[in-house]
Amino acid sequence: DDCVARRVRIARRARSPHAIATTMEALAQAWNTWDNAVSTATFSVLKAIDWEVHPISPVTKDWIAVASPTLLLTSLMAYLAIVFSGFAILKNVPKDPTKKDPLWIRSLVIFHNVFLVVLSLYMCGGCLLEAYRNGYSVWGNAYDAKETAMAHYIWVFYVSKIYEFLDTFIMLLKNNLKQVSFLHVYHHATISFMWWMIAHRAPGGDAYFSAALNSWVHVCMYTYYLMAVLIGKDEKKRKRYLWWGRYLTQMQMAQFALNLCQSVYTSMYSPYPKFISHILFVYMISLLGLFGHFYWQKHIAGAKARKAKMK
C-alpha cells in the first residue's frame, strides 16, 4: 500500500504545473542550444562559399522558420531519416498490386491533393496579382521591402515545400517504393532550403516568377494525382482520363528550362541578389538532367519495351 501511495504522489508531482513548466523550460533550453549550434554552423558555411544571405529581409525576419534555418534543417533531417528507415523496412515487404489501400490512406491522399491544388492556386494567383500591382516586368525585378504582400506569398510558398514532404510519406504508406526515387528525394530535400534562402534574404522581386510558375505546375500535377486516386486501378478509365501524364512531365521540364533562362538573364541584368541566380542556374541544370532521364525511361524507352512485348 505504501508503494502504491508513493507512486501516486510521484505521478501527481509529475503532472503538477510546476513540473510541466520545468519540463518546458528544459526543452526550450535544449532547443536554443541546438538552434544556436545549427544556425551558427549554417551561416558560417554560407559565408565561406559566398552565399550572401545577409542582411535578412526586415519583412520576414520575425516570421516562422525564416531568421534561423534550424527548424527547416531539423525537419529535413527527420524527413531523410524517415525516408531511409522506411525504405529499408519496406523493401522486404511484398506488395500486392491488386490490394486496395485502406480507407484512411485513401482519404488522406484525397485531402492532401485537394489541399495542394487549392494552395497552389492561391500562391500562383497571389504572386501574379502582386507582380501586376507592383509593376513588375517578366524578369529583372529588384527586391523591395515595401512589398509586404509579395513577401507573404513567397513565405507561404517556402513553407509549402516543407508540407510537401508528406508526398514521400504517402508513398511509403502505400508501399510505392518505385516512386521514392533519387530524383524525388533530391528535389524535395533541396528545394526547401533554396526557398528558405529566398524567404530569408529577398522574398520578392524576381523570386515571384519561379513561385508563380511552379505553383501553376503544381495545380496541374496535384489535379492529376487527385484524378488518379479517384479513378483507382481501373485501367480503362486510367487510359481515358490520365493520358496526359507524359505532358505533365514535359510541362515540368519546360518550367526548369524557363527558370534556367531566367537565371542567366538575372545574373547579368537584374538587381536581384546574384548568388540566388547562380544557385538557380546550377540547380535547374541538375533537375533538367534528372527529369530528362526519368522522361526517357518512362515515356520513350518504356514505350518501346511495351510495344516489343505486344509483338
Image (tube, rainbow, N blue to C red):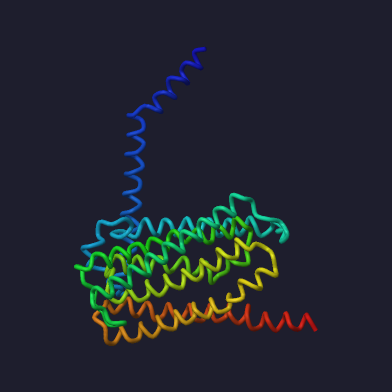
The quadrant where residue 121 appears: bottom left
What residue sits 50% from the left and 16% below the top?
3
Residue 199, x across and y down, in percent = 31, 66
Residue 208 against residue 116 in the figure, above or below: below
Furthest toward the right, the residue is 311
What residue sits 72% from the left and 81% below the top?
305
Q: Quadrant of the C terminus?
A: bottom right
Furthest toward the top, the residue is 1
**Residue in front for this viewpoint, 124 or 35:** 124
Residue 95, x across and y down, in percent = 70, 59
**Residue in front for this viewpoint, 251 or 19:** 251
Image position of 143 (left or right of 114): left
Residue 67, x across and y down, in percent = 28, 59
Residue 120 against residue 109 in the figure, above or below: below
Residue 76 against residue 235 in the figure, above or below: above
The quadrant where residue 75 appears: bottom left
Residue 128 against residue 96 in the figure, above or below: below
What residue sits 29% from the left and 65% below the top?
200
Counting labels gives: 0
Image position of 9 (left or right of 129): right
Image position of 233 (left or right of 196): right
The quadrant where residue 87 appears: bottom right
Residue 11, x across and y down, in percent = 44, 24
